[in-house]
Image (cartoon, rainbow, N blue to C red):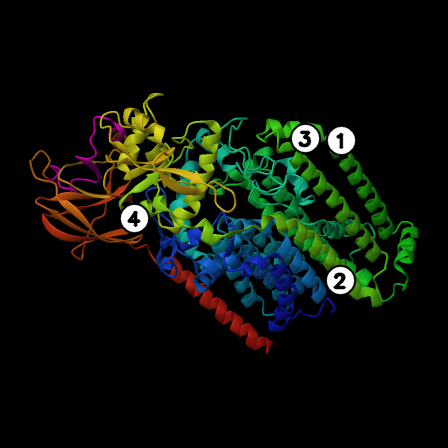
Amino acid sequence: MRSSSAPARFGIKQASLALFPLAAVLILLFYQSFERDFTLFASDGPLGAAKATFVALPAIFAGAWGDLIWIGYNGGSASPMPTNLIRMALGAVNYSKFYEPLSLLILGICAHYFFRILTKSPVISVLGSLAAMLNMNFFSNVCWGLGTRAICLGMIFLALGLVLQSETGLRWPRVVLAGLCVGMAVLEGADNGAIFSLFVAAFVVVRAVLTRENAVAGTLRGLGGLAIVTFFAGLMAAQAFAYLIPTHLADASAVAANSPETKQAQWEYATQWSLPKIEIVRTLIPGIFGYRVDSPVGGKYWGAVGRSPGWEPKHPNFARSSGSGEYAGVLVATIALWAVARSLARKRSIADKLERRMIWFWAVCGLISILLAFGKFAPFYWIVYSMPYFSSIRNPIKFMHVFHLCVMVLFGYGLLDLYRNFILNKSLPSLSVGASLAAGFKKTGSFTRKWMLGSIAALGLAVLAFMIFVSSKSDLIKYMSRNDISATEAPAMASFSEREFLLFLVFLAASLALTASIAAGAFSARRAKWAGVLLGGVLVLDLARSDQPWIQYFDYKDKYATNALFDQLSDHSFEHRVTARVAPFRPDSLIAGGQARDLWGLVYNDWLQHPFQYYDIQSIDFAQMPRTPFMDTNYSSSFFPRAENDMSSFGRLWQLTNTRYILGMAAFLGDLNSRFDPQGHRFIIKTLFTLANDKSGLPLVAQTNSEGPLALFEFTGALPRAKLYSQWQVTTNETETLQQLANPAFDPAKSAFVFGDTNTVEKGNGSAGTNAMEGTVEWVSYAPKKIVLKTKAEARSLLLLNDRHDPDWVVRVDGARVPLLRCNYIMRGAMIEPGAHEVVFSYEPAMTGLHISLAAIGIGVLLCGFLAVKKG
């Protein structure tokens, strides 16, 4: 290890050396990715979503229009970030195989750089990078399909390392690069990157103040550095801001501007994913609350993260939903605690004043993060929730990302202290392990003796807690049964938790013993290499074992195999939509019986996320839409039933949204005609089918037959996707329009509403009240961002396209641009003159954000070249 004054070096050689241990561990964990037909599970960004036409790269760098769910939505634009470059390079199938381990590898290499700059030690750098790469919080998110969060953390590590390295020279170029890395973290992690950026900002200022003897000069230097980081982070993240501000943040500001009662009403929804205080124990015991909600052999998650607001037993919403773990690693936590304890010791065990204060800084940041992660289970999150735009950050548990970063940094400081004072300290006597421990224990008043006594006490308390936990097994089973865990599963899940607690004791004993042995000098001088080997062995064995349950593979050829039902729905799918729910924002379906309904909900949710996207099947429903725009919520809520037995408003919603196909039990045909369409009776059975098991044993395969019991219903009364009207009404009153659209007396097949004034839409409503024939519309071609139609009409007509309105859509008639109209409150339209015309709807969002982000990347490349030349 070099002296603390010598600048640390990190280049291609150091990165290459870091690559080998990281890659070796990942290959052992993800070896099935090399098998031909197997791909990794991903809830977010599965293979089906990666293959969907609307997210094809490189086209979505110029904007993405999500046409497969709801009535369409603004999907933003793909950013020039590592995730998208990996997907473009690998293709959909290889991306689903290798993106998760590659994102973890990027995190590991970035963490290696940070720890190399912080400690100047190759060994500590490898240990720190392994701890970051295998940290369960990020590992589990990656295995859920969110590799962006690992890369986001990697960019934060780079930013922190650059700020540290800027203290040794070439300050401003490195601070600029740090800002660009923070911006890339925002591009990758969105609100997660924004959360990290707040703590990076604090780090920049605090570090500058602590490294200057003059507090005023340090503060000014810190604020200057913060301004540079903020500016260049904004440049890099320009494309993300260009999308988030007019969409997500605009709705958030509307909520913030509302009354306190309105904001309170959003509170439960925004804090659904909060961390219950008791579950903080998951940071030390990985599976005590289980792992995934679908883990086998008793490993199902049974905590309360993700519980729906107002949930009660037998309630149709979520009792829980965990897609992530919180385990930091016993050894990591032990050594992080060592760092904090040494910094607080009276005899200044850590002599460097700056190191002590930085340890306190990261410890305070970790504490703040935990308090905020508790969300609705503690009073602290409400403080930040009340601030502008914070209500747009759903899920307070995201602050646990910062907590784990803090633990990792403290782990690095702890290793630095152990190596500097106990492993590389040549003044310590060369004794056997046993003799070293005995000598250390005899040193009355020494920190090592106090640590040993504390370790013994901690292990004893842990054993006592385990005994209490085991003796309370029957109470735990009863608790599980009261909280939506079946009586047959609860005993196995309780036993699984016991085993996880027992494994925790094993690794706790090993970690405490290893730390105490190092502190006693047992691995000093000639045994130094064994300290690294043992630390690395315990670290990898512990974290890799606990991470393994998050890794799931499946045979993608089997999972995405087509069938007659999917073939029918995917045929010209742009001309119709399908649903299996009574309404898009409700879980109700046309399935009788609680168990059958729950099973159907799982099946259909799987179809939405996988085969429907794989085959570009458009559905009014969605598996995930965490931030529904206000306009969409307002529109759909206008069609809730006016009476308990009157479902005609749902039928009207299907009619207006071009929802031609409905999935449900064949026995509901009578109800559909009598309750959903009492005036028209326009529902018929198109296809009968049943469900069969796939290779995994789940009933996910649709098989057509002549008996059912399931059916694909056709609603012949649904409006076509594109239609010409000779009659329309001009309006500026949104509330009145929604009321008219839901009114049974209004016939949406004969007339439509157009928002605007008489300067845009001719007064007199075209040929309203005349006998002019409505024209015809033919499809020429369809793509998510470009729709080409041929129209023919005798009189001036309104062309209604039953896709969601967005100002970034442009309409051209025979090559000439015409105004885009907002019709029927939320749909797109245009005025068409008499005669035959070619009408093109094209999605053309502004490219300014992309150009700024690309310019920022160019600046980063130039600065890297400049630093490389200077280094040479």
Q: Which contiguous range is marked in magenta?
A: 739-766
What element does badge 2 sit on? helix
**Lower sequence index among marks 4 and 3:** 3
Circle 4 residues within 10 Å: few <14, some 14–19, many ≥20 = few
Say left or right for 270 vs 459: left
Relative image position of residue 433 (x, y in whole percent): 88, 58
What element does badge 1 sit on? helix
Say left or right for 702 vs 658: right
> CA gap, disc 3 to disc 1?
10 Å
Residue that carries the numbered disc 1 in the rendered image? 471
> Can residue 528 be found in the magenta stretch?
no
Mark 4 vs mark 2: in front? 4
Circle 2 residues within 10 Å: few <14, some 14–19, many ≥20 = few
Residue that carries the numbered disc 4 in the rendered image? 571
> CA gap, disc 3 to disc 2?
39 Å
> CA gap, disc 4 to disc 1?
60 Å
Q: Which mark is residue 476?
A: 3
Residue that carries the numbered disc 2 in the rendered image? 533
> CA gap, disc 2 to disc 1?
38 Å
> CA gap, disc 4 to disc 2?
59 Å
Callouts 2 and 1 close, C-beta under 8 Å: no
What element does badge 3 sit on? helix
